[in-house]
Image: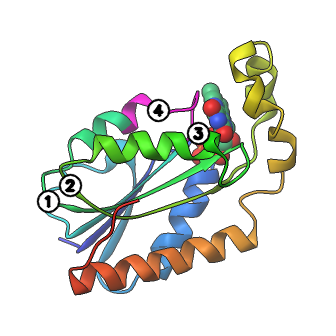
Amino acid sequence: MAKTLVTYFSRTGNTKAVAEAIYEALPGDKVLRPMAEAGDPAPYQIVFAGFPVHAHSVPYPVEVFLKSIPEGKKVALFSTHGSVTGSRLSREALEYASILVAKARLIGTFSCRGKVSLKALEILTQSPEHEAWTDMAASAATHPDAGDLEDARAFARWIATLGAQGHYRGL
Ligand SMILES: Cc1cc2nc3c(=O)[nH]c(=O)nc-3n(C[C@H](O)[C@H](O)[C@H](O)COP(=O)(O)O)c2cc1C
């Protein structure tokens, strides 16, 4: 069994691209799997789990997976979102995800912007509750870009170092 699992949920490929960058940068034994095929996270030393922000939150299948991560497991979370990086809108889903893995050991989080599909925009702009982030969506069109993917690789290397040393930190 590989030491590190990198798993992701992705509808349009943004989170998958970030997951691939993370996987690529990790040293040692590792596997990359869509979340639906991730299986039991218990045997891995470190679990990277990624998702797109949906309606300010964590998509349901991701919620189920995060809750299945055993107590004490080292976890790193990553997300992609249409809203501007660092904004409250971009942070709240990761904050919720960190609560879902509260029993595990969260060793880090990463997020970057991801382009919003035209189809999603058409549907979402009709709902007033999505106005705040859909206003920002146009400027996400070039993401994740080369800089985002480089940041994701640096994040992966940092987590691998922390994981190997047994250190961890919260959000
Ligand atoms: C149904 C749906 C809801 C979304 N809700 C949000 C949201 O609340 N906040 C946000 O910043 N982005 C939101 N987005 C944009 C996605 O998070 C963003 O495009 C993401 O990078 C998509 O990742 P994927 O290609 O891996 O599926 C939403 C997208 C969809 C399709």
Residue 97 location (% of width, % of height) = 39, 43
Circle 4: element type? loop
Do we see residue 12 in this rendering? no
The amino acid beneath tag 4 is Pro
Mark 3 or mark 2: name the one nearer the start of the chain. 3
Marker count (numbered): 4
Circle 2 residue: 104
Tell me the element at label 2. Answer: loop
Distance in Å between CA atoms under marks 1 and 3 = 29 Å
Please give the name of the residue rendered at 47% of the width and 47% of the height, measured from the top-left corner: 94
Marks 2/1 in contact by CB < 8 Å: the verdict is yes
> Which of 76/12 is in front?
76
Q: What label does residue 11 carry, if any?
A: 3
Q: Amino acid at mark 1?
A: Gly
Describe residue 100's horizontal placement relative to residue 128 as left or right. Answer: left
Amino acid found under the numbered disc labelled 3? Arg
Contact (Cβ within 8 Å) of mark 1 with mark 4: no
Crowding at dot 3, Cα within 10 Å, few <14 / some 14-19 / many 20+, comes out as few
Q: Residues within 10 Å of mark 1 (few under 14, many from 20)?
A: few
Cα distance between the residues tagged 2 and 1: 4 Å
Mark 2 closeness class: few <14, some 14–19, many ≥20 residues within 10 Å: some
The numbered mark at residue 72 is 1
Separation of residues labelled 2 and 4 (CA atoms):
19 Å
Between marks 1 and 4 in the image, the one whose residue lies nearer the viewer = 1
The residue drawn where x is 62% and y is 74% is 151
Helix, strand or loop at mark 1? loop
